[in-house]
Amino acid sequence: MDKIGCGWILLAAMAASLPAAGAERADILVADFEAADYGDWTATGEAFGPGPARGTLPHQMPVTGYLGEGLVNSYYNGDGATGTLTSPAFTIQRRCISFLIGGGKYPGEACMNLLVDGAVARTATGPNDRPGGSEQLRWHHWDVNELAGREAVIEILDRRTGGWGHINVDHIIQGDEPFAAEKQIELTARHRYLNLPVKNGAPLRRMRLLRGDETLREFDIELADGEPDFWVFIDLAPFAGQSLILWADGIPKNSKALDNVRQQDAIIGADTLYRERYRPQFHFSSRRGWNNDPNGLVYHAGEYHLFYQHNPYGWKWGNMHWGHAVSPDLVHWHELPIALYPHTFGDWCYSGSAVVDAANTAGFKTSGEDVIVAAYTSTGRGESIAYSTDRGRTFTDYAGNPVVRHTGRDPKVIWYAPGKHWVMAVYDERGDSKGVAFYTSPDLKAWAFSSRIEGYYECPEIFQLPVDGDPAEARWVLYAADGEYAIGAFDGRTFTPESGKHPFNRGNCFYASQTFSNIPAADGRRIQIAWGRTGHPDMPFNQMMNFPVALSLHTTGEGIRMFALPVAEIESLRGTAHSFEHLALQPGDPNPLAAVSGELFDIDMTFRPGPTGQVRLVARGLPIVYDAAAQTLACGDCAAPLKPEDGAIRLRVLVDRLSVEIFANNGRIYMPMRAVLDEANRSLELAATGAPATTGAPATVDAIAVYELRSAWR
């Protein structure tokens, strides 16, 4: 292990014209805004409210980066309010004035000024002057050496209305050097990983990995100054043997935050990887950091590729990259290096899709290997593509990006065989109107607008499925992030709804699903993965993917509807089986599953409810309840209507550490639920409750099979 201590280089050089103090002089606090009111400061207008804000104000994006409990926040009553906040006069007694600042970037309108003799001597703004951005405060400083001994006033000004028409300020400090400054360390990439310490809730620091003047990586990170909560990493493999610089801004003086940065051949914590206390055991989660939307689901050369929205450097959303994992069987996943990096900092890699360009329509093919083409939103440019000639291991950004420019995001690309062209379904915003726009292309590069359908929000998906297994009765399915779907016809340019939108997901652990492209015809399945919105703050990772499901269309009493069942590959994890048949369930009867104990389960059960009362399956403390009179299936805060079929209800339940996924009546109901299950509770319980059996026939169980599952990681 190399502990990097290659010498600090302080980039913010200080003026030396003030008299030497003989010893380091203490900083002078001008204001920290921790009191209930502004004290001797004078406020005018409405923007600054009756006193310092306690963080984020109503309808504001989360405000971060301030110290303590209070700060100046002129978003009081929104961006339409204006006003000023002015300090009492003070004497400039140090070389620098340091402060935290964020909000709008509008000089003279939303800013902080240093006034000397009534004139603006120094000024600063936040970083934001366009949609998007962040409410994070960052350290700035003014060099005021030439103003030493002068009397000054600080004026915080908000005369701006509209987007980002506000300013945030905290902790104003006089000192002989900046309270926080840029620092860097020099290193040679001798090992695979550069491990960085993270402390949840610490101020975000901007970091860069540089090769000379070239920025190789740039990101925000909650860099730990003391004991970290966990470690993240930069993969140095592409830069092996090279001289690099790790740069960070806003590092407080006397901070030891960069002292703990370490180079080594393994990520710190590798010895417990996938065995952490709350790590899902058969749902994919990234080794470190945040994940959300699945992206670019594609099958190629014997591998299922799962790309996904990923923050490699923290537990929270941010720094959007495309993470990457592959699997031979949809169960056992191997995480690969990051697939797509931001073009520049702030030009994030948002959601998208991937296809195999088997006919080489784009002309990217250079060998016998078919090319994977990823379509994604580059937030600073528009809809963009990148291509891989090595089975998705590395990607090259197309020089002609963006290929589509509009107000929207999240391109889903498919090949429309009858028309021999590509189709892009992409979320499209036009003022208050939200929908899906369709574009077509012969080569993935040049796209033409075809049509638009109203009423969908982000992450669109479109595909065709046979009805009841009959290709002659196929329908197209269109949905967006919430999964509510329409069934209809699609001619390669326009989607014509036949019915819907219909509810699909009935749980609380589902968003932004996508289906795999290029599944072999011999397989024929339409396989979907959704973002499983569940996590635990004690872990070095956050969120997961739901278990893959196979989708199908079936005729029901309400019309054609989409069903979902877990892919059959889950059976590869089955271990000990417990089977029971022909059980009568009376209220007060002993629990027939009392002898079953385990952590991970696949449960398959068919029962016949009585005319009243409830059937309850309690999985490690989480009740799943069928109410016979109401004909509803409920778990936690979610419920769905469910009628018996031929007098019976069939349940399929997958139990993992952070979720329980429920499927009813062969997939008619799909209810993925987030649940942090009690580690000590490994029991299952099956019971009837409610009306006594004398008022009606008891519930009966035709059969129940309980399979203990092995971890997919071990």
Image (cartoon, rainbow, N blue to C red):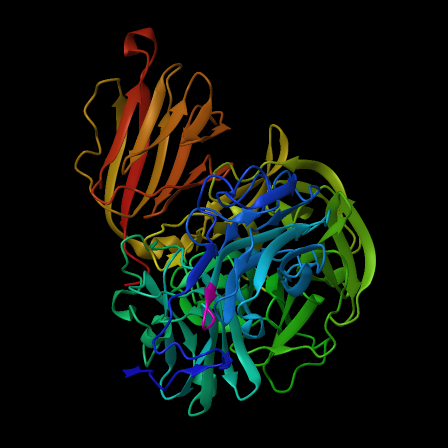
- 499 on left or right of 590: right
- Report the label total: 0
The residue closer to the viewer here, 546 or 93, is: 93
- 280 on left or right of 563: left
Q: Quadrant of residue 541?
A: bottom left
Query: What residue is drawn where x is 41% and y is 33%?
Result: 650
Residue 249 placement (x, y as % from top left): 49, 72
Residue 286 placement (x, y as % from top left): 41, 62
Examine the rendering and report whether any part of residue 524 can be seen: no
Q: Is residue 117 magenta?
A: no
Q: Quadrant of residue 624?
A: top left
Query: What residue is drawn where x is 25% and y is 69%?
Result: 271
Q: Quadrant of residue 373?
A: bottom right
Residue 39 placement (x, y as % from top left): 50, 42
Compared to residue 419, the image places residue 444 above or below, namely below
Compared to residue 565, the image places residue 94 above or below, namely below
Residue lying furthest top: 695
Q: Quadrant of the N terminus?
A: bottom left
What main secondary structure does the magenta stretch of the protein show?
loop
Examine the rendering and report whether any part of residue 542 can be seen: yes
Query: What residue is drawn where x is 50% and y is 65%?
Result: 98
Magenta span of residues: 174-178
Compared to residue 167, the image places residue 643 above or below, namely above
Compared to residue 444, the image places residue 560 above or below, namely above
